[in-house]
Structures are given as structure tokens and as C-alpha cells.
Image: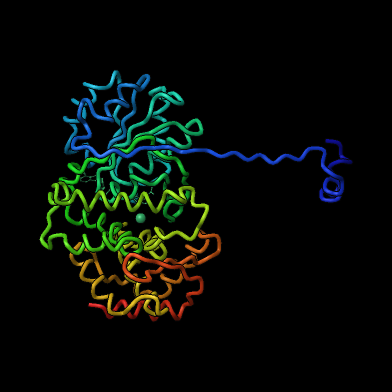
Amino acid sequence: LSTASLRLPITGAIYDQSPELALTIAADRTVRYSLVETGHAFEPDGPLSEKIRAAAGTVLVVVDDAIWRVQRNRINRYLAQVAGTYRVLVLPGGERNKTLPQALKIIAAMDECGVLRRSTPVIAIGGGVVCDIVGFAASIYRRGVPYVKVPTTLLAQVDVSVAIKTAVNLGGFRNRIGSFWPAELTIIDRSFLSSQSPAEISQGLGEIFKLALIKSECLFDRLEEIPTDWEPDWYVSGAAADLIRLAIEEMAEDLRSNLWEETLARGVDFGHTFSPLIEMRTAQLGHGHVVALDCLLSACIAVEYGLFEYEFLPRLVAVMRRCHLPTQHPAFADADLLWESLIETRKHRDGHQHLPLPSGIGKHTFVENLDRRGLVRAARLMGGLT
Ligand SMILES: NC(=O)c1ccc[n+]([C@@H]2O[C@H](COP(=O)([O-])OP(=O)(O)OC[C@H]3O[C@@H](n4cnc5c(N)ncnc54)[C@H](O)[C@@H]3O)[C@@H](O)[C@H]2O)c1
Ligand SMILES: [Zn+2]
């Protein structure tokens, strides 16, 4: 560039003339991905084996350390049977491990395996954290390579399974960097749930509770019917099959019409308004539990707005107890933290509250004008529920 052209006032010089080239490019893209339920993810003739057999070169299999601890021999035997060559990368689950360095580890392993752009899907076997990190790494490696998810927690089976979102946490914020990148195949195998603790299972029930309250009275009824003395094995058994399938179907129905979140007023964001920041600040609350607490607070806000009947609140509390979900936590009485969470979430919703609130069991609406006083009143109402 000459000195003269550098001095030109940019707006005057360029936009006063009609442009010599003005193009708008628009394209539609169809997305297609499958979820398959199977009794044994590792059956030699199953859909996972089909993918692995068809893969070119060395298959990278990323396994959650909790699964590796209990199924290492089984997974090695299985992979030796169905994969030509493979490499296992074990990663820790847990929210604090949902980091960029973990994603970069996967990317380094993809390089070492010589993953091809289309023909060597990366396999993720683990909870929501491992599935999200693998999905994120797959979405940025060569601008996107295929991957397959085998979610192994109840939460991941009913929620992460259907979604096309991937992410890692950054700078103290949940999912601060991420992408929309569907797994081409997701395998649901309830037998993985037998090694989950009751507390971890109840994290998954937190997301089911969210979905039921906002979208499906039928699902809510099912939650009211689960045995009070359930153990993790109950969720593996046929008795829970309908509950889990219905949760997945309801989730799919809700997400399908807004996969890329063009609309930022989303019913499935119910329970995810105050919870993201609280989850990062209070290490002892897991994702499903903090989501459930957010749902209860949101229901109290809905009562304040006259949208939800006060008489329904004890019914919510009873279902939460049945699901072994917490109904109180000091963070949900901390007005400053709650208000800060709402402000942070507004940014994620493009400057709008888009606050999903139940307007009955299985129905919802949005409000945009919750003020701090209303929030404090709702938090007090929640604190008084026993
Ligand atoms: N992509 C999405 O749309 C989406 C949707 C919902 C949740 N998420 C994400 O999912 C994450 C939560 O998932 P999560 O609850 O599975 O957490 P997680 O992956 O951290 O798993 C919880 C714990 O269980 C262990 N584990 C995994 N499978 C197990 C098994 N079968 N038996 C025993 N232990 C097992 C893990 O190692 C971890 O310690 C959050 O980061 C959340 O943001 C993503
Ligand atoms: Zn969630």
C-alpha cells in the first residue's frame, strides 16, 4: 500500500462509490445422525463394530477413566476382535477436567494415529465430559472429522446423546468455547449404568426432571412412579427402559427444530439459567443437581408471576426427593450470586433473559423482565419449601 492510500478515510473512500463486487452467499446443509439402543455396545456384530470395522487406519478410542477402571479387559478384548489397529486414550471424567488441554491431548493422539478426514471416526466412550471434549476436538481437527459417542452415564444417555453441541470450559465459565458438531452415531447401552453410584444416577434424573417439567407431563408421571428405594441396577433393568427411551425421544423432539439454536428462547434451557455459574463456583454440586435446583427456583419465579400454581410446588419437591435430588442449597439463597448468574446468562441469550418458566406440568413460557426483587422473593419462597 502507498502512504497516500493508508491515509484515506476508510468510509468515505470505499462506501461512497457503488461496489464493484457485492455477493451474498447462502447455503443450506442437511444434518443426519443416528442414535441406536443396544443391550451390548461391544457386541461383535453391533452398530459400533460396524463403524470400527469400516474405519481406515488406526482407530482412536477415547475412554473415560471410570469405565477403563472397570472394563479395561473387556474393551481391549473387544477392540482386538473388531479393529485392525487401534489406540486407546484414557481421559478423566468430571467437570474440572473439561478443559482445552484435554482436547489438545486428543488432537495430538489423532495426529499420531493418522486420522483421515472422513474415514477414521474417533470413538468416545464415557460420560458427558469425555463425549463433549471428544466432540469438540473432532469438530476442530482439520475443521471437522467424524466421531461416534458411547455415553456411559444416565445424564449423558438422555441428554448429551441427542445434542449436537460440544464444548470445553474456559476461564471459570462452563462451555465457553465449543461448536455444533453431531456425532455420526450414538450408541445407548444401559448396562453401563450399573457401575454408577446412586448420586451419579440422580444427576441424570435431574435432567429428566427438567425435561418432564417443561415439556412432558407423561414423563413427569413416570418419574412419580419410580421406586423410592431404587438402586442403579433398576435403571439397567427393563423396568426403566421406557422412562429412559421417553426422555431421549422428548429431548430429540425438542432439539430437532432448533439444532443450531437460531432461536435463543429455548425450553430446554430450563434449569440452565442460574445453574451454569453456580456449578462452576460450587464444586460439590454436580450438573444434574444444580439444574434441578435451578428448575425449582424457576418454578418459584413462575409462582411469583402467577404462571404456575403454588399447589404444584410440593409435588415437584416430592418428585425431586424420589429422584434423590437436592431441594435446597445455600447458593440458591445468595441473591448476589443468583443475580450475577442471570446477568451472565443474558449474554449467552444475546442480551435477553429468555427465562423459561413452567406454566403447568409439562408446559412452559418465557419471561423477559425478572428484576432483582422478584428473584429474591422467589429464592425466599424456595427456601421455605420443605
Ligand atoms: N453436549 C450437550 O448438549 C450436553 C448436554 C448435557 C450435558 N452436557 C455436559 O455433560 C457433562 C455432564 O455429564 P456427566 O454427568 O456424564 O459427567 P461426567 O462425564 O463428568 O461423568 C461423571 C463421573 O462419572 C464417571 N463415569 C462415567 N461413566 C461411568 C460409569 N458408567 N460408571 C461409573 N462412573 C462413570 C466419570 O468419570 C465422572 O467421574 C457436563 O459437562 C455438561 O455440560 C452436554
Ligand atoms: Zn444440562
Taking the spot 36% from the left edge, 63% from the top edge, the residue there is: 271
In front here: 371 or 319?
Answer: 319
In front here: 273 or 2?
Answer: 273
Taking the spot 33% from the left edge, 64% from the top edge, the residue there is: 362
Residue 321 lies in quadrant = bottom left
Taking the spot 78% from the left edge, 38% from the top edge, the residue there is: 21
Q: Is residue 384 above or below residue 361?
A: below
Residue 25: x and y in percent read 66, 39
Q: Is residue 313 above or below residue 54?
A: below
Q: Residue furthest right?
A: 4
Taking the spot 20% from the left edge, 70% from the top edge, the residue there is: 318
How many numbered marks appear? 0
- Screen quadrant of the C terminus: bottom left
Residue 254: x and y in percent read 39, 54
Q: Viewed as shown, does residue 376 lie left or right of 313?
A: right
Q: Residue furthest left?
A: 229
Residue 27 lies in quadrant = top right
Residue 219: x and y in percent read 26, 59
Residue 122 lies in quadrant = top left
- Screen quadrant of the N terminus: top right
Q: Is residue 96 above or below residue 64?
A: below
Q: Viewed as shown, does residue 95 lie left or right of 371?
A: left
Would residue 64 be seen by someone viewing this image from the given angle? no
- Ligand number 2: quarter of image: bottom left
Residue 186: x and y in percent read 32, 38
Would residue 186 be seen by someone viewing this image from the given angle? yes
In front here: 64 or 212?
Answer: 212
Q: Residue furthest front?
A: 218
